[in-house]
Each structure stands twice: as structure tokens, then as C-alpha cells.
Image (tube, rainbow, N blue to C red):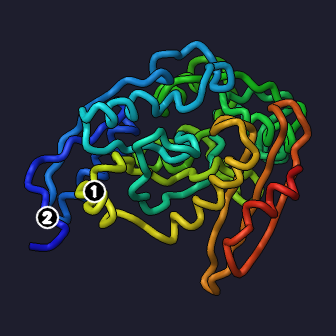
Amino acid sequence: MSEKNTITKTLTIGTRGSRLALWQANFAKAELEKIGIEANLQIIKTKGDKIQNLSFDKIEGKGFFTKELEDALLRGDIDFAVHSMKDLPTESPEGLVISAVSNRANPADWLLINKDKVDENGTLKLPENAIVGTSSARRKAQLSHFRNDLTLKDIRGNVPTRIRKLKEDGFDAIVLAAAGVSRLELDLSEFEVVQLDPREFVPAPAQGVLAYQACKSAVEIRRILKHLHHAEVSQATNVERKVMKLIGGGCHIPLGVYCKKDHGNNYHVWANYAKDADSPLKIARRSSSTFSNLAELIVEDLS
């Protein structure tokens, strides 16, 4: 019997309950089914889901989209958890490990603009003093770098909710991750979509990647998850997340890092960082034939 199908029980996947989180968990479920493993989903509500009236930088603690899932893992309520990797702190709790990462969807951010507010001659196609919705300190810092006239307002909720708020709540534009919009196959025809270049408007570390987290002691589960693992993606996200770890402050600091390996096996890293959303943006760019020490060099450039 191959190691793919030594487990006969149905695995329980822990997930948040948003439409996007369920897409992600069902994607993992489908990937398991390809290797003969059955799975079901268990929805777990996190602190970040429950608190909707504060921007991310005002919610205390780290891992507020992940902690309850991790607690369920440690209790043995679920076999593994599916996370948006960009939401995961760089250190797993004692006893837990990231066992596999998915392929990478489009890592970029997209700017969605109400069509009656589009300025074809304006930077980012935004009119003067446009009201842009985002609760991300990283996005705020980069938007302010490109357009210091913008009014930036917090916006919370899942992806469809934020799109509804763009139409109804007085925003001229909002910023969303391309991966989430694409995975949900949302109709964006009523908006102007500005696809931001991830080498300039730099995404969050590991944006577009899913992480599969399990108990360190669950050797058989981890062996199964290795069949879903994309090693080259992991090499890139390791660089991105190491930059975040070395700078400190968790996954909601104003830091964008994007690492890409080219066909010649060279690594290219783009990083933007600000001490807070209102501070000047520092920019770093590096290329190397190895990922060794690459994160450290980027952090030096940003300091």
C-alpha cells in the first residue's frame, strides 16, 4: 500500500466560515481526493471574524485569523487547518507545523474603482482626493507613497461585503487581493480594475498561497499533506516570511515582500516597508543566485 492512502479515516479540515475560506478548504479537500483521501470541513470562527468594527492594526495580539484554528488542532478537534498563509504569524505555536503550502495564485493587489470615479490621467486612475477603502497598514502606506492626496478609510468584511460597500458606502475605490477575487470568480464588470504590479505595489508576504498546518506529532497526516506541497513556492515564501520575522511586528505591519524565482534559477525580491501607515516608504530590491541570506540583505536595505 502506498504512503498516499495509508489513512483510511475521513480527515477533518478546520477552516474559517467566509466564502473565500470555504473555497480554500474545499480546494484542499479536492486535492486530497485526487490521492484517494476523503475529508470533511469543520467551520471555526476566529477573533478576526468576530471583531468587525476595528481595523487590523487596532486589534490586539497576533494571529487573530488563525488562533482558534490552531487551538482546535492542539485539542485534536481537527486533523489539519487551511490558512491564507499571509495571515499566519511566522512562528507556529508549540506542537504545530506548516506541513505543506499550495501553488501560488496571482500575488498582486487589485484596485477596484467605481466607473464614474475613474480618472484616466490620474496615477492609479484615481481622481484627486479619492476616498479609498482598506484596513491594511501595508496598503495604506503604499497608496500614500504613490498618491499623498488620497483619503484612506478603513473597510472590513469578507470580499463580497467589501465590494458591496464600494458600491453603497461612499468609497471611490477599494484594494483587494487578486487571488481572493479570482478564486471566488466574482463579476467585476461594473468597476474599473487596476491590476497593481507586485514589483511596485508589493503584496503581503506569502499573498496568494495557502498553508496547511498540522500537529507536529501527527506524522501520518503530515506525510499525506506532503503530497500537496509545492517546494518552489515554499522557497519563495520562506524568504518573504523571514523578512517579516526579522523586522518583527507580525503580519499586519506595513510591509510588502515578494520573492520570485526566474527560469535561470535566480531569486528576485521586491520589498516596501514603512514604520507605520503614515511614515515614508522604504524600498528594497535584490537579486541573487541563492536564497541564502537574501532576507537578511533585504532587511539591511530597509533599515
From where the camera sits, is residue 18 visible?
A: no
Callout 2 amino acid: Asn
Q: Mark 1: few, some, or many residues within 10 Å (few <14, many ≥20)?
A: few
| Image spot of residue 119 (x, y percent) | 78, 41
**Front-most of 110 and 156?**
156
Task: Please name the residue shown 87% across and 42% down the image.
Answer: 145
Q: Mark 1 — residue? A: 219
Residue visible at 34% across and 46% down in the picture: 215
User: Does the residue at mark 2 contact the one at mark 1 (Cβ under 8 Å)?
Assistant: no
Against 299, residue 289 (above or below) is below
> Which residue is painted at 52% across and 53% down in the image?
208
Q: Residue furthest bottom?
A: 264
Image depth: mark 2 or mark 1 in front? 1
Between 130 and 77, the one nearer to me in the picture: 77
Q: CA distance from mark 2 to mark 1?
A: 14 Å
For label 2, the residue is 5
Q: Position of residue 191 (x, y in %)?
A: 59, 39
Q: Position of residue 18 (x, y in %)?
A: 38, 31
Image coords of residue 297 (percent x, y): 81, 63
The residue positioned 83% from the left and 40% from the top of the image is: 274
Q: Earlier in the sequence, mark 2 or mark 1?
A: 2
| Label 2 neighbour load within 10 Å: few <14, some 14-19, many 20+ | some
